[in-house]
């Protein structure tokens, strides 16, 4: 994993997690069966539920396991809207949410709901007065991410909760979990999206925290698993892995984030020495593992390929959306022009990055930028 700087797109499964998961691939019991094999699977799921709940200071029965953050976001938005449409049909979200929020919102708009999209400032912070002015009698839900997966900006969730009072709040904590504190007692959110892979658990598992008393309509109907909110035989090994990943995160994330923050700051300091380079996102209210920079006169995609040839894997932005030539909606929302957005590079740090990795990145990046600029007619014609 040397030289890997794309943790926001995917994390390797921690060896300790993998080890804990392996026996559960062999247990045949269905967690809903009453015999001993079934009981073993059920017990493992409930232990994992406790671990995930503990990580965010929730109660175990407030955790619903899903197939990942995308499903959790769909359940939070569409599931909430379907169940609560008698109370109103207006939802507030931001312009820089992940597509697994924005596309469900589009779907709801086509089906009789109204959505207000909160703009952000040049650093990616949501406009609080816009939220305040958007709240109406029929507003049933506010959905704002905890931190942005592309530019790393951390939102003032507690202030949003203060403004919105009793209106239920959904927070997508996919990018923040394991990097900064995600504590539902502090956030006071009613629904929170969590993802396993982002904390070094397996892919294909996630969870939705559903505060006691919050009502949702299920999106997947069947045998009634997960309190009827998410039917289908549970992914036992995956859930066990998520649970162990949550235990490790609880113990280690503070120290890990301090280490990554030091790497992050060294990278930012050095990268900004390159002429015509700029930081995307807020300098301080920023995830400890996120560096997003843009370079004039070059194309992010060419830079990613060029770095890959040097043994460094980074990204141009969100790997979550399908391959399009459109610039990132997050970068355009913070006011970047198309060509500025296209010249951006996303570096995300993680558990297995070392000092050597960081030294190499700092050494290789300036010459890669310089080489590409020499090939750029725009740069030569300045
Ligand atoms: N929300 C955020 C903030 C994300 O960064 C991502 C992608 N990691 C998702 C939701 C969707 O996650 P997944 O593709 O694992 O379902």
Image (cartoon, rainbow, N blue to C red):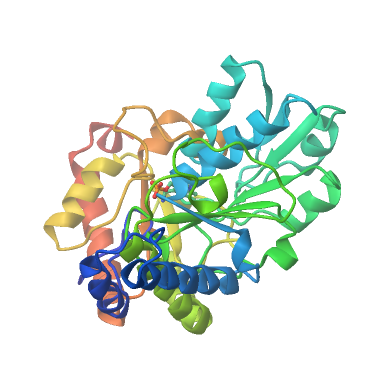
- Image quarter hosting the C terminus: top left
Q: Residue at image x 21%, y 43%?
A: 302
Relative horizontal placement of residue 214, taking residue 378 as reference (left or right): right
Query: Which residue is the extreme one toward the front?
Result: 35
Which x, y percent locates residue 260? 44, 75
Q: Residue at image x 51%, y 52%?
A: 226
Q: Name the quadrant containing residue 43.
A: bottom left
56 up-or-down from 30: above or below: below
Which x, y percent locates residue 22? 23, 73
Q: Residue at image x 69%, y 55%?
A: 211
Q: Nearer the viewer, residue 281 or 88?
A: 88
Q: Residue at image x 23%, y 37%?
A: 376
- Image quarter hosting the N terminus: bottom left
Q: Nearer the viewer, residue 150 or 247?
A: 247
Q: Would residue 331 be seen by someone viewing this image from the given angle? A: no
Relative horizontal placement of residue 193, taking residue 262 as reference (left or right): right
Query: Which residue is the extreme one toward the left?
Result: 309
148 up-or-down from 287: above or below: above
Q: Nearer the viewer, residue 177 or 196?
A: 196
Q: Would residue 272 be seen by someone viewing this image from the given angle? A: yes
Which x, y percent locates residue 135? 83, 33
Which x, y percent locates residue 99? 47, 36
């Amino acid at each position: 994993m040397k030289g890997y700087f794309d943790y926001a797109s995917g994390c390797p499964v921690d060896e300790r997690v993998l080890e804990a998961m392996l026996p559960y691939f062999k247990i045949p019991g269905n967690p809903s069966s009453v015999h001993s094999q079934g009981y073993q699977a059920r017990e493992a799921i409930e232990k994992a539920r406790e671990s995930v709940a503990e990580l965010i200071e929730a109660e175990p029965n407030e955790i619903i396991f899903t197939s990942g953050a995308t499903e959790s976001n769909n359940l939070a938005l569409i599931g909430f809207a379907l169940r609560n449409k008698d109370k109103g049909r207006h939802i507030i979200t931001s312009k820089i949410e992940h597509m697994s929020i924005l596309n469900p919102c589009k779907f709801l708009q086509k089906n009789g709901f109204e959505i207000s999209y909160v703009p952000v400032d040049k650093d990616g912070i949501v406009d609080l007065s816009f939220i305040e002015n958007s709240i109406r009698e029929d507003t049933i839900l506010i959905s704002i991410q905890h931190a942005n997966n592309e530019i790393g900006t951390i939102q003032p969730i507690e202030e949003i909760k203060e403004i919105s009072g009793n209106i239920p709040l959904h927070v997508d904590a996919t990018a923040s979990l394991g990097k900064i504190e995600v504590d539902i007692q502090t956030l006071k959110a009613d629904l929170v999206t969590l993802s396993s892979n982002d904390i070094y658990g397996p892919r294909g598992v996630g969870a939705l925290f559903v505060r006691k008393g919050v009502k949702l309509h299920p999106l997947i109907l069947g045998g009634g698993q997960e309190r009827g909110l998410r039917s289908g035989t549970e992914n036992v090994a995956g859930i066990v892995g998520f649970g162990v990943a949550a235990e490790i995160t609880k113990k280690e994330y503070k120290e890990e984030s301090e280490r990554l923050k030091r790497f992050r700051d060294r990278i930012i300091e050095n990268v900004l020495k390159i002429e015509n380079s700029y930081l995307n996102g807020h300098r301080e209210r920023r995830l400890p593992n996120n560096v997003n920079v843009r370079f004039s006169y070059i194309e992010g995609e060419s830079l990613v390929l060029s770095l890959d040839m040097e043994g460094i894997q980074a990204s141009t932005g969100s790997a979550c959306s399908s391959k399009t030539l459109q610039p990132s909606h997050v970068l355009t929302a913070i006011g970047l022009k198309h060509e500025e957005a296209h010249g951006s590079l996303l570096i995300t740090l993680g558990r297995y990055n070392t000092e050597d990795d960081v030294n190499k990145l700092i050494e290789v990046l300036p010459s890669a930028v310089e080489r590409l600029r020499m090939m750029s007619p725009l740069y030569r014609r300045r």
